[in-house]
Amino acid sequence: MSAIQELIKEIKSLKPVPAVVSQLIEIVDTQGASMKDIAGVIKYDPVVTANLLKTCNSAYFGLKNPAESVEDAVSMLGVDQVVELVLLKSANGLMGKENIGYGIREDAMWKYAVSSAMIAKQIAARLEIGNRNTIFTAALLKDIGKTVLDRFIADRFDRINFLVQNHNLSFREAEKKVIGVDHAELGGMIAKMWKFSPRMVKIIRHHHLNDETMKKDREVLTVYLADCICMMMGFAVGADGLAYRFHRHAAQELGLTADDISDMIAEFTFQMEEVENLLKMV
Amino acid sequence: MRRIVGVADMQVSNDPGEVLVTYSLGSCIGIVIYDETARAGGILHYMLPDSSMDRGKAAEKPYMFADTGIPRLFKHSYQLGARKNRIRVYVAGGAEILDQEGFFNIGKRNYMALKKIFFKNNVLIDSENVGGNVNRTVRLEIGTGDIHVKTSGSKEVRI
């Protein structure tokens, strides 16, 4: 069996994100859904509902009366918070895994996924870019391909690293050369298999901005830049280091200066406590 | 005992049983200083070169910036008995993403900020491991002054 065939087999055995997640993002981002619509989608998934209520009633929120239904949760916490909780909870099992090949511990991996999603959301809000829940979720799940590719990386790390060190390839380019597929491509395949929206598949697939045709796509650029900021801040930078390409046009296209990026780094440092709390809660 | 120096954080110690460690520096810089005679030292983990961009944030988190963090690292170590003429200085971090040149290169700007401050204050760097596309973790054993650095994709080495 070739590496690609093995990978496809492995992708098929992944436990997918609940279908309710895609529906939820779709109605929130494209139809400006009401509280009732949101509750209507969530409540038909018993596992997601149970998780939401459990989190909602945790000490973190300090609700006076416990939420007993999805409707209660939405009216007590608001649409944005509920959607975020459902997204985080659904991604936790997938992204909170140790990546041995990439040399990232499970807690670091999850913290990085959440940080990246928060920074992407911050950029989208700053630049008034729509589809924020799609952007948030894509940033959260963009490295899902690493989870599957990890074992293959572990076996071939020396060859990949040699290409990075001596042939000026990025880690992603070296993955592609040695294995035949890279983690972004693989992530796109997984997203497609799970029937995510074409927009989400596109962002995950192109989050390293290796395709010229994506140069002006503001949603892809937002998630890309959030990833760069995380790398600079040293979040979950594993054995692959910072060996990915920086495309300065991404920031320029979004109208962001180097000072704006410094400003976002400073801003996020203050939000890190919030991330820690979110991590504990979910 | 292990004490973690977080992001935008600084810790000093003269407890011989203590080990200070800072993880995952990325483009941030870790400065380690140590006085062998006083057996005291510390680590600063800063993220950005210059506090003039936001004085308010610098007042709240001075260890976020080179210019507000570095003087405090030295002052706090002096309070534990360290002396400037005996202090050894080690610098790590300041990595960059591939092709990250010019003004967007925060790693390099972080390093330049430190060089400028050290030059003005007559501080020499004894050893350094900076730049490149790698991630670094640094630890300082207070009892011995041993410094170890772990670079992504390689084993930990003693400086």
Image (spheres, coloured by chain):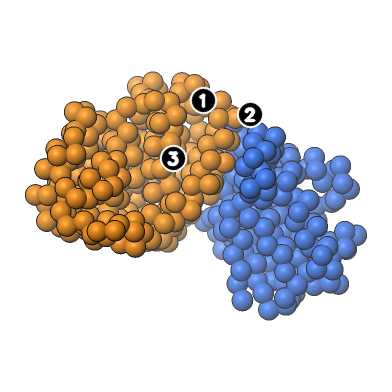
Chain colours: A orange, B blue
Q: Position of residue B151 (x, y in %)?
A: 58, 56
Classify residue A132 as left or right of residue B49.
Answer: left
Q: Secondary structure at mark 2?
A: helix
Point 39% across, 31% down: residue: A124
> Could you tell me the amino acid type at mark 1?
Leu
Q: Which mark lies nearer to you, 2 or 1?
A: 1
| Mark 3 belongs to chain | A
**Residue A49: percent from the left, percent from the top?**
16, 54
Category of crowding for the residue at label 1, using alpha-carbon neighbours closer than 10 angstroms: few (below 14), some (14–19), many (at least 20): some
Residue at numbered disc 3: A119
Chain at tag 2: B
Q: Amino acid at mark 2?
A: Gly
Q: Are marks 3 and 2 on the same chain?
A: no
State how far apart marks 3 and 2 are (Cα). Answer: 23 Å
The residues tagged by marks 2 and 1 sit, at their Cα atoms, a distance apart of 15 Å
SS category of the residue bearing label 1:
loop
* Residue indicated by mark 1: A256
Is residue B137 shown above or below A118? below
Q: Secondary structure at mark 3?
A: helix
**Amino acid of disc 3:** Ile
| Quarter of the picture holding the C terminus of chain A | bottom left
Residue placed most toward the observer, A17 or A277: A277
Q: Are marks 1 and 3 in contact (CB under 8 Å)?
A: no
Disc 2 packing (10 Å; few <14; some 14–19; many ≥20): few
Question: Which of marks 3 and 1 precedes in the sequence?
Answer: 3
Residue A272: x percent and y percent?
A: 49, 50
Mark 3 or mark 2: which is in front?
Answer: 3
- Out of A43 and A217, give the one closest to the viewer: A43
Residue B102 marker: 2
